[in-house]
């Protein structure tokens, strides 16, 4: 069945739908985070085009897989996209690491727990996910004892049963948490405008975005720009990931990667990864002003192991 706004899974819990305990938890997380700032920046970020999938192609020879969520775990899927892109960017920049895609359900469950959401279920917050990635880290998806994803070019998925089992962050075994804490993202910071998102992306940092901005399923082709743009319509309580910016003065935009399969929004117009669309700067501003979106910094990754068999 094709994904449409009526059958798509969404799972961001907006502020007006949060319990008092969840609101207080998220406010506490936000107040403890550093403000967004690029330290030592010397390069201009305006009028630049920087797309993080160039790093994936350099490291892997292809795009990262498009994700296909089967429940309302979009915040966890966003977290996986963020960390996987951080990793390929660092490796492309010369870090002596091996790329290992991360296990999405772990981060999703821990993010729900840090959001103050208990038990199994759907729904989480951007701030809870950010705290989980920084405090509890991530685990590799290829470890023995973990359920493996399925799917091919149409979308990588763990399936609803696994997503729901791991959604209860308090029930995740200590052995996984101890392992995850060895591999955290160093920091996350709130991003509240297109300009901040542009600065983050131009420096190689993806932005996890949570908002109620909905779009039509069929992006509109701008032949002059050579891009497909999302057309705002309706409401999505949803999390996605900004993974590229083109600060073209004629039509500045960011590329928004979704987790509803590679086919959800039709084929891209250019070299973009499937399953996403470009978002105009003013629309990105609207999404980011909802104050639950974050840029993520460097990753404590997986060093290459050099074996001497001589």
Image (tube, rainbow, N blue to C red):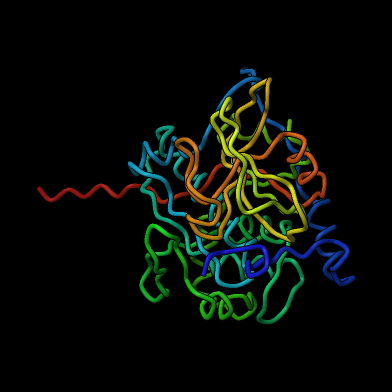
Image: 271 above or below 211? above
**Residue ID at (42%, 41%):** 56
Task: Judge left or right: residue 31 versus residue 218.
Answer: right
Q: Viewer-proximal residue, 152 or 94?
A: 152
Please provide percent x and percent y for residue 107: 58, 64
Q: Quadrant of residue 69?
A: bottom right
Please provide percent x and percent y for residue 42: 63, 17
Image: 73 above or below 100? below
**Residue ID at (68%, 26%):** 251
Q: Quadrant of residue 144?
A: bottom left
Please provide percent x and percent y for residue 289: 82, 44
Please provide percent x and percent y for residue 266: 51, 50
**Residue ID at (55%, 42%):** 298
State the residue lying farthest toward the left: 310
Number of numbered callouts drawn: 0
Q: Viewer-proximal residue, 276 or 187?
A: 276
Q: Viewer-proximal residue, 146 or 15?
A: 15
Image: 271 above or below 181? above
Q: Quadrant of residue 41?
A: top right
């Amino acid at each position: 069945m094709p994904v449409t706004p009526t059958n798509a899974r969404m799972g961001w819990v907006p502020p007006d739908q949060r319990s008092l305990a969840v609101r207080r938890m998220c406010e506490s997380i936000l107040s403890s985070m550093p403000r967004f700032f690029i330290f030592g920046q010397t390069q201009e970020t305006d009028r630049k085009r920087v797309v993080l999938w160039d790093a994936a192609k350099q490291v892997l020879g292809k795009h990262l897989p498009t994700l296909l969520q089967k429940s309302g775990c979009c915040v966890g899927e966003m977290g996986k996209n963020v960390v996987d892109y951080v990793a390929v960017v660092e490796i492309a920049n010369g870090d002596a690491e091996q790329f290992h895609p991360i296990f999405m359900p772990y981060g999703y469950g821990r993010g729900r727990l840090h959001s103050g959401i208990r038990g199994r279920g759907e729904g989480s917050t951007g701030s809870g996910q950010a705290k989980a990635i920084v405090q509890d880290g991530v685990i590799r998806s290829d470890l023995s004892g973990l359920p493996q994803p399925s799917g091919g070019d149409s979308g990588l998925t763990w399936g609803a049963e696994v997503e729901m089992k791991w959604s209860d962050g308090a029930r995740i075994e200590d052995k996984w948490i101890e392992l995850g804490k060895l591999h955290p993202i160093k920091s996350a910071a709130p991003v509240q405008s297109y300009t901040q998102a542009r600065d983050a992306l131009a420096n190689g940092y993806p932005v996890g975005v949570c908002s109620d901005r909905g779009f039509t399923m069929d992006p509109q082709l701008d032949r002059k720009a050579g891009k497909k743009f999302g057309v705002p319509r309706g409401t999505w309580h949803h999390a996605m990931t900004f993974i590229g910016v083109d600060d073209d003065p004629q039509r500045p935009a960011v590329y928004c990667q979704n987790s509803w399969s590679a086919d959800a929004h039709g084929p891209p117009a250019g070299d973009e990864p499937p399953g996403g669309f470009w978002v105009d700067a003013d629309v990105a501003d609207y999404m980011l002003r909802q104050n639950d979106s974050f840029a993520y910094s460097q990753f404590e990754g997986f060093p290459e192991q050099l074996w001497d068999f001589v």
